Amino acid sequence: MRTIRPRDFTGHRAWEALDIDRIDDATIRLHWTDQPYRWHVNDGPEVFVVLDGEVDMHTRAGGVEHVQRLVGGDIFHAQDGDAHVAHPVGPARVLVVERAGSV
């Protein structure tokens, strides 16, 4: 057993991750970042939970980009094929559950 305090986790580089567990084909990882990720499309669903900080989640559908501000406690759920990119507003810690090896 262990207790993880997200606010105590700081990476040395953007999107550094603490691997928490792998359940079947899914990974659960705590990420620290202060920089945007990159546009990507997962090869399966992704659950993205903001634990600390704020993140602007950019999504693209039908050639139109949308931005939604996520704050602590908010959950973003992307389905297989959804184009998205996370832009933190300052340092942020997020929990990501996705297929192992996904982008």
Image (cartoon, rainbow, N blue to C red):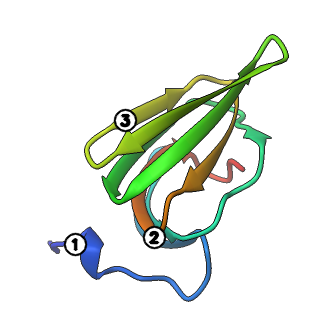
The N terminus, quarter of image: bottom left
- Mark nearer the N terminus (1 vs 3): 1
User: Looking at the rendered structure, which numbered label has been put on residue 4?
Assistant: 1
> Is 41 on the left-hand or right-hand side of 79?
right
**Quadrant hosting residue 94:** bottom left
Q: Whole-Å distance between the Cαs marked 1 and 3?
A: 19 Å
Q: Is residue 65 above or below residue 28?
A: above
The answer to whether mark 1 and mark 3 are in CB contact below 8 A is no
What residue is shown at x 22% (from left), y 72% (from top)? 4
For mark 2, what is the residue?
Answer: 91
Residue 39: % across, % down:
78, 44
Closer to the camera in the image, 65 or 16? 65
Type of amino acid under label 2: Pro
Q: Residue 87 — which label?
A: none
Marked residue nearer the N-terminal end (3 or 2):
3
Q: How far apart are marks 2 and 1 (CA)?
A: 18 Å
Identify which amino acid the numbered label 3 is placed on. Ile
* Residue under the point 46% across and 44% down: 24
Kindly check if marks 2 and 1 are in contact, taking CB atoms under 8 A apart as contact.
no
Instruction: Name the residue carrying label 3.
Output: 75
